[in-house]
Image: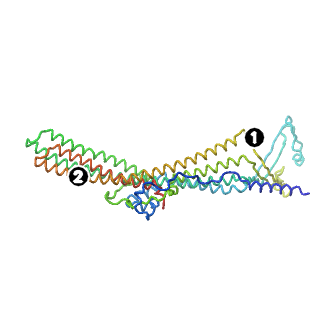
Amino acid sequence: MNYSKIYFTLILGVVLFMSSCKVGEKYTQPELPLPEEFTQEVLTKQLDSIPYASISWEDFFHDTTLIALIDSALKNNHDMQVALKNIDIAHRTLKQNRLEYLPSIDGNVASAHQQYRSENYYSNPSSNWYDQKGTTPPNSMYLQQSQFSSGLDFSWELDIWGKIANQKDELTAEFLNTQNIKNGIQTRLIADIAKGYFNLMMLDAQIEVAKRNVQLSDSTLHMVKLQFEAGEITALAVEQTESQRLDAASLVPELEKEIAVQENALRVLTGELDQDIRRSDYNQKLLSNEQAINLGAPIDIVRNRPDIRGAEFTLIAANARMNIKQSLRYPTLTLGGAFGVNSMLPKNWFEIPGSLFGNITGGLTAPIFQKGRLKAAYDVAKLEREKAEIELQKSVLQAVAEVSNAVVAVDKIDEQLDFAKKKVENSRSAVNSALMLFRSGYATYLEVITAQSNALKNELALVDAQQKQLYAYVSLYKALGGGWQK
């Protein structure tokens, strides 16, 4: 009876049986807390247009200077460069995991091993070595063992419970998440640069407003001084008019400081500290399709938003880790072996076939008592998976809320902008009327100062509202998951 064939057949049967008993829970996307549709449909004025988030950032922005800044940032920003390195690292790790199904092979190129003992040690000399040398072993420091070997060792763990397959799922999710993190950085980077650029343009516009009001105040101050010299008004009128002029003038250095700070912030984002931050005309159309927004379906934010996609990749990886921890509680089947040459004397090292050796091993080992560590590790991994699922649902809720807030902001800032424009028109008319009445003696200098102060405040508020309008559209674009699409 051939016992080796029976043994091999038995082992093969065990392997096939265990391979059909893969352990673990296959990942399925959990139910997400999404509404059937967004409640603020007031913005979906052109339902046949493409979803807002699907617009490429190069098409979303119309300002060529801003596009150049963003393009520079995507190439030179340090966070983007780190993200690309992380993608490369994750890809190499995933590529290595594909080889885990193969056996490990180690080569012993040349190994020499000799042990020496003395008479008080419980052993005997290597008699064959001394016999072949034709010498008598000494009592002290005699050669007890001598080996010169070269060969190959291999070991192979069969993936009978799907541990390697789950490791692949985990690494794949982590690799995809590195790409997703890069998309998230790009979305945030584009939004930050756009808002910084729009803020810079607002500061430029506010400086122009402040300078115009300084010139207007100079003209008013000149008239007041003439009336004071004519004895028609008191010195208090001159002082208060001068104070109003200084208020307008003091805005200029403050705004210049904010411009310098904002320019440096943009240089850091673009990764080029010596870059000259240019600006386009503030009054040109800076964004595309501002009045034709299609929000798309709520499920689109799950597909588009990097933070939600990242939360799901984290859940997939946690599910795979839970399965790995579970598989560690089951038996492990390993095969091993060695082949090479081994001799007692160096001269016989590569004598073929006299120095050849080989062995094959196989083992099925199972953990029996590990002080509860394996069960605890599995329970913790299961809880970590549950945490990841909660984080995914939380990120979806936050995303829906952000979209809703952004929609409200876009809708309401348009109304505020209309009011701001009307207030500016009214305040400019009031300034003209006050000056005419002042020259005719029907208005006091206080009325002129008040009109000019209100005009300055309203013009600055208009510029601020225009900036907030641009911010609102960019925030909506980001909230819907736009900015990383090609």
For the question of whether residue 482 can be seen, the reply is: yes
What's the amino acid at mark 2? Answer: Asn
Judged from the image, the secondary structure of the residue bearing numbered disc 2 is helix
Q: Which residue is mark 2?
A: 426
The answer to which of 432 and 355 lies nearer the viewer is 432
Which quadrant of the structure image shows residue 244?
Answer: top left
Q: How many marks?
A: 2
Q: Position of residue 268 (x, y in %)?
A: 42, 50
Which of disc 1 and disc 2 is earlier in sequence? 1
Q: Position of residue 297 (x, y in %)?
A: 48, 58
* Relative side of 181 to 1, left or right: left
**Disc number at residue 401?**
none
Q: Position of residue 151 (x, y in %)?
A: 78, 54
Q: Which residue is mark 1?
A: 369
- As drawn, the residue found furthest toward the top would be 120
Q: Position of residue 228 (x, y in %)?
A: 11, 42
Judged from the image, the secondary structure of the residue bearing numbered disc 1 is loop
The answer to which of 183 and 80 lies nearer the viewer is 183
The answer to which of 463 and 221 lies nearer the viewer is 463
Q: Residues within 10 Å of mark 1 (few under 14, many from 20)?
A: few
* Relative side of 362 to 216, left or right: right
